Image (spheres, helix red, strand yellow):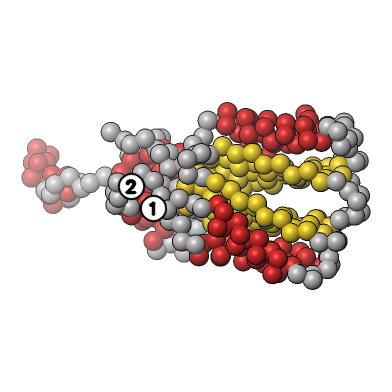
Amino acid sequence: MEKRGRGGRVPAHQPAPQSSATPRRDRRPSMFEKESYAQILRERLRDSLHEVQYVEPPLDESTADLGKEWKSALARLKFANTYRMEPPKKFQAHSVETKVQRILKDNLKDVKYDDKVFSRLSLELADCIMSVVKEFGYQRYKFIVKVLLIQKTGQAINVASQWIWDVAWDSWVAAKHETETYVALALVFALYCE
Amino acid sequence: MEEYQRHCDEVGFNAEEAHNIVKECIDGVLGGEDYDHTNINQWTASIVEQSLAHLVKLGKAYKYIVTCAVVQRSAYGFHTANSCFWDTTSDGTCTIRWENRTMNCIVNVFAIAIVL
């Protein structure tokens, strides 16, 4: 029994059989390799009954941006190119203004100032004006509606607005309704969005 | 080659940054002043102008609308409501209330993303 037959004896003992008999078994992927980080994460979270407290982020941030990339890819996929550089119908301020003025007048006719009523009324008016403006059907426009209700008690109020926008397509509308006890001011801004 | 990522639009409007900027502007203009009807026009105009200038200096691809209401402080009722039709992921708003002994000031900033 010479120990020289080591080569032949090895399969019998099988200390590390796979390394010689079968192809070398793949090492478990390292967490620091980009493409395997996501896989490890999924593996860990799939059947686990306990929570993963902290997973070391990869050395480079590319896989951390997976969520953002997905979202922007989705946004890119959604829109086919229409080759349109301008809105189909430009925002007509005067027609919107008459409509908004009529809404204010109809809703606030004979309404006296009342604290509780007005806090709800301001929100209702804003929603109402918003739905009416949307009904006009201006495509590719974003809207902002602002409603101010100020009680008249002899104080002074100053309202100023300034903006940076596309002068060609963006516009605004202001409507005022004044009574003995309060003033109602409605502002509508329309902004073109490509 | 990666495409240029619009990082500001992915994250959305940074309301806190805008809040700090506008608060500084208001403090600079109205800080320590009492209500004065001769100057009030100038003050509201300069608050709005300075806020807008500082917001634009951030260099983000946004359209801005800044609204400022300054009211003399007394016993009065004031209600305001906003309704916005926009993309909630990229657009945002920020409201700053400021007051001192004689005045109340409300500044509203709307930021709408420009899609480049």
The residue identified by callout 2 is: A84
Q: How many marks?
A: 2
Residue at left offset 89%, top offset 48%: A155
Q: Amino acid at mark 2?
A: Arg
Q: Where in the figure is residue A168, as x and y percent of width and height?
A: 47, 40
Q: Amino acid at mark 1?
A: Pro
Residue B1, quarter of the rendered image: top left
The residue identified by callout 1 is: A88
Left or right, A9 with respect to B5, comes to: left
Q: Residues within 10 Å of mark 1 (few under 14, many from 20)?
A: few
Instruction: Say which mark, if any, is on residue A1.
Output: none
Q: Nearer the viewer, residue A16 or A56?
A: A56
Which quarter of the rendering shows the N terminus of chain A? top left
Q: Where in the figure is residue A117, as x and y percent of width and height?
A: 79, 69
Residue at left offset 55%, top offset 61%: A133
Q: Where in the figure is residue B86, as x and y percent of width and height?
A: 52, 54
Q: Is residue A131 above or below residue B64?
A: below
Left or right, A181 with respect to A16, comes to: right
Distance of mark 1 from mark 2, alpha carbons?
Answer: 8 Å
Residue at left offset 33%, top offset 54%: A78
- Local SS, label 1: loop
Is residue A119 something one can see in this rendering?
A: yes
- Local SS, label 2: loop
Callout 2: chain: A
CB within 8 Å, label 1 to label 2: yes
Left or right, A186 with respect to B70, comes to: left
